Image (cartoon, rainbow, N blue to C red):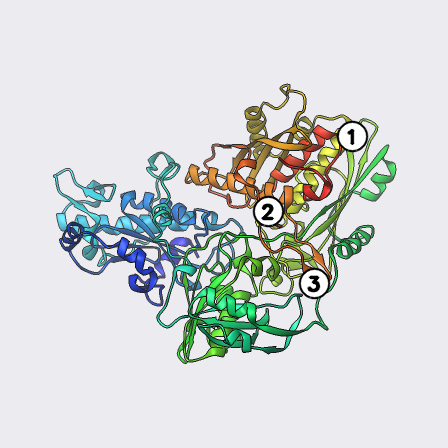
Amino acid sequence: MSTLQNIRNVSRRELLQGGAALTLAICVPAAVARAAKPSAKAAAKAAEIPAGPPFEANAFVRIQADGQVIVISKHLEMGQGAYTGLATVLADELDADWSQVRVEGAPADAARYQNLFMRMQGTGGSSSMANSYTQYREAGAAARAMLVAAAAAQWQVSASEISVAKGVLKHASGKQAKFGELVAAAAQQPVPATVKLKEPAQYTLIGHSLGRVDSVAKTDGTAIYTADLALPGMLVACVARPPRFGARVRGFDAAAAQAVPGVVAVVPFETPASRGVAVLAKDFWTAKKGRDALKVDWDESQAFKRSSAEIFDTYRKLAQTPGKVVRNEGDTAAALKRAARVIEATYEVPFLAHASMEPLDCIAQVTAAGCEIWNGVQQQSVDQTNLSQYLGLPPEKIKINMLYAGGSFGRRGNQYSDYQLETVAIARAHGQGVPVKLMWTREDDMRAGYYRPAYVHAFKAGIDRGGSIMAWQHRIVGQSVMGDGLFSKGMVKDGIDASSVEGAANLPYLMSNLRIELHTTPPEVPVLYWRSVGSSHTAYVTESFFDEVLRATGKDPVEMRRILLDDKPRHLTVMNMVTQKAGWGTPLPEGRARGFAVHESFGSVVAQVVEVARVGDGIKIERVVCAVDCGLAVNPNVVVAQMESGIIFGLSAACRGAITFKDGAVEQSNFHDYPILRMNETPKIEVYIAASTEKPSGVGEPGVPPVLPALCNAIAALTGKPVRTLPLSAQGIKIV
């Protein structure tokens, strides 16, 4: 079914049914509502706007009588710019006035708002623009055609004689009308069977660095996050969680918690994903004080009690044995035996926290009629399925309202719906239909969350007498992020989790003998996809080891890559762009060095050069130059912002990021012992976008993978020693 057919199959009247309509009184804190109250002059002007039902052309756009264009985003806005990108492509085809474009989050309804790549409703995998580009353009073009048809009928002229620009329709006779004046008539027009989309030369918004649609609301405080929302009679929950994964509640003493003024109730709960004891109060601080006073007796007989050292010891031993074959070309074993030289190396990466700016939170109201959820929802279909199974309700009885999210990096897209199930369990246990807001603390997020898995990578490279690579063997050891969740059927085949090996299994270099193997270890620590998923570790190890081999053979790392990527024009484009902009090959002052890496993920190819300098007893990251081919850049500013964000995110992980375990307990708790890169440590970042007329591909994640190896290759060039274990701080490498 084409995207236009998908659009046509949605009734214009369906859009708001079951939607996330929240009144201003409920959504906006009183202080913000007072600040946002319109002036008498503005109110008088608003009264002049004709009232009437909006024109709902399809599931993705609604035009109000006042001329406002409301774009319905099927994707979560969590800082990555999805709202702006989707609004841009729709508004361009609609020829709307950008100043009148607004965006609302779509309700949970996979039939209308399916992610065309995932075949369910959800946001992830840097797919928002890639899967929605044509769909939203067609939605805008269809709405435009209906407006033009309405005007043509009113003016008794041919539709082909009408032009549209910035929300105004015009005819050579002098007749003109704004969108708002035609909403009633346009609503009576049939949805066109086909639409003609613009040629690139006709774009007025696509490809331009427009201001983001959410900037003002996020600046003046009117943007609604879960923490901002206060429903009538709502209670706030704070949970006492097991100190070790797998522990259960044996018993608890609620007396001290209940003695805290303002505590309303203490309720234990258990879901398929977690368990604990919740303290309910009318505000967060009271709930937290009650939680801190609560005494819980934990049964740790089945709890995880291993240390990070023990985990890595197990992984290293596995890496010395054959694993499941992921990719096999030529005869690597025989080539290694024939090689003039064999270079071996083992690389290790730790568990990592997502550490989003907004800790996890959710609001749930469970009544006899069903369940309603409010939060920054990333995987609507997954959450609806898990909640309906837990409550024994049909999915249509689970209503999910999408709010803004302050970051996620994969954490809110948990296939087990852990924190949503917690909220529902607590609300149901308390009963009375009272809405409950669950709020995690930063410490909860660090110690009771899900993590990027730790991995060990073992390499062997065979070198011939001319110094060329004749064999490549790569063994990967670590947990599967798919586990036994809802995504495992599609992602795990023959025991191989595709997300564990992405970025390694598709190694782009031309090699005649190549073998990739995987050991998937038993589940111990709760793990989840993390920004750039498998490429977050495979890019680091493959690009670092590749450099290590080239340095050992005296080959220039960029020139040799050009030879081995001869059939990869996109790789060559960004390589040439970034090396030229970074001055690769030009002399540097003593005590400075550069490192290079290139990687493809989520349909985009990114190359980066990192420049470092020795400063005292440490190393300073001076400069990062980035080139990206992401297809058509719908909004160059958003692309640049996401590359910069990914670079800083990756550098934070490379320099200091690590979740470690001692006797099964997480040792980190907050940003003081899980630090992220500070502003004074952030290098100068330059981003260059390769020109392209191809459809857009991902930008939210692809900036992360190459920065880790580019940094480590720069350090290796400076010190003469490869960096085989992250973070750098654990290796005594001080970043200043």
Three-letter amino acid code at the position of disc 3: Pro
Q: Within 10 Å of the Cα at label 1, are there few (<14), some (14-19), or many (20+) other Cα atoms?
A: few
Q: Within 10 Å of the Cα at label 2, are there few (<14), some (14-19), or many (20+) other Cα atoms?
A: some
Q: Earlier in the sequence, mark 1 or mark 2?
A: 1
If the image is split into quadrants, where does the N terminus sit? Answer: bottom left
Mark 2 or 3, closer to the camera: 2
For label 2, the residue is: 675
If the image is split into quadrants, where does the C terminus sit? Answer: top right
State the separation of the CA atoms marked 1 and 2.
34 Å
Of residues 690 and 103, which is closer to you in this image?
103
For label 3, the residue is: 523
Q: Secondary structure at mark 2?
A: loop
Reply above or below: 623 against 445: above
Please tell me the numbered disc located at residue 471: none
State the separation of the CA atoms marked 3 and 1.
37 Å
Q: Residue at x 62, y 45 (%)?
A: 653
Q: Would you identify the image quadrant in which residue 557 lies?
A: top right
Residue 521 shown left or right of residue 70 in the figure: right
For label 1, the residue is: 552
How far across and down, in percent of the image, does residue 153 sit?
16, 51
Q: Is residue 18 visible?
A: yes
How far across and down, in percent of the image, does residue 450 sit?
61, 59
